[in-house]
Image (tube, rainbow, N blue to C red):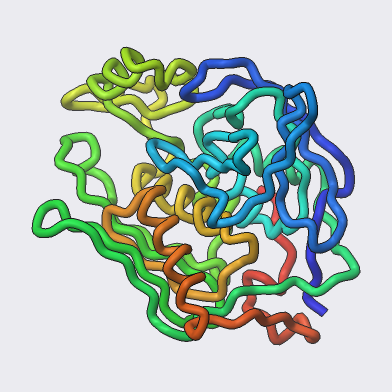
Amino acid sequence: MLAQHTLQTLTRAVGVGLHSGQRVELTLRPAPPDTGIVFRRVDLPQPVEIAVSATAVSDTRLASTLSNGDAKVHTVEHLMSACAGLGVDNLYVDITAEEVPILDGSAASFVFLLQTAGIEAQPAPRRFIQVTELIEVREGQGGNEKWARLTPFHGFKLNFEINFSHPAVDTTGQHVEFDMSTGSYARDIARARTFGFTKDVEMMRANGLALGGGLDNAIVMDDYKVLNAGGLRYDDEFVKHKILDAMGDLYILGKPLLASYSAFRSGHDLNNKLLRELLRRTEAWKIVSFDDAKLAPKGFSEPALAW
């Protein structure tokens, strides 16, 4: 049987929120089978649980925000991406503020935390949403066009293309394909950092956003170049971060996908609209599990490798 997974023990980290600038303590705890990933706002007078689901996404401006009506948690996508990349199904995420800490701006720190805690199999089958028909959402026209789609595929792979008119971005790769069956998430994707432009950062800070952002947790560019002293971690780090974000956004579905995801200039908003369209089209997918783990796609049938 291809089993669900959780952590062997709890693990903790402390950081600041990218947009709020608030100090936040993060604790990742094991959870029973079929729990899913549940965020818990333990800073409130009565702790509030917010279960991950596509319909719980309440805001997609600059990040993915989850809400249950009583409380919110912002910027969940990097942690969700790490859980997707390492195959963690069940997890309690305790946080002491309304935003997940940005840490180094990528998913690498979350990967380290999850692997340090240890990932263990549970006595329950892992359930996938297998896409059986094309699902697509599109917005804009001409130079403003963007789209995202899911097509049937026995496994999980992502194709992403960006289109920035900026000297620092134009000199890097702007298209990436990542296949869970042949690549290593921790090695190939997890270290890609979020990025922004100085002019946008200044505008966001004037509006009370990006208060925790800086050169230690983001790639920052002026009109011509990358300002970080160490440069880029990957030659194509910009588009790889978009893959990282997409993996996190798609895992908000609550179950891993068996599908091929392709996107052009997509972001948190369009990714969530794609999930909602998928859920609406009930004839276009089915839930599957694998009694024989050998029949599962390679990227899921084998345990996630360490660095």
Residue 248: x and y in percent read 53, 51
Q: Nearer the viewer, residue 117 or 96?
A: 96
As drawn, the residue found furthest toward the left would be 142
Residue 267: x and y in percent read 36, 49
Q: How many marks?
A: 0
Question: Residue 259, relative to residue 236: is it above or below?
Answer: below
Figure quadrant of residue 130: bottom right
Q: Is residue 28 left or right of residue 152?
A: right
Residue 236: x and y in percent read 35, 47
Q: Residue at x 50, y 50 (%)?
A: 189
Question: Residue 71, relative to residue 19: is it above or below?
Answer: below
Q: Nearer the viewer, residue 165 or 30?
A: 30
Q: Residue at x 38, y 43 (%)?
A: 237
Residue 278: x and y in percent read 47, 71
As drawn, the residue found furthest toward the top would be 206
Q: Residue at x 22, y 35 (%)?
A: 168
As drawn, the residue found furthest toward the front would be 69
Q: Is residue 24 left or right of residue 275?
A: right
Q: Quadrant of the N terminus?
A: bottom right
Question: Residue 42, relative to residue 271: is it above or below?
Answer: above
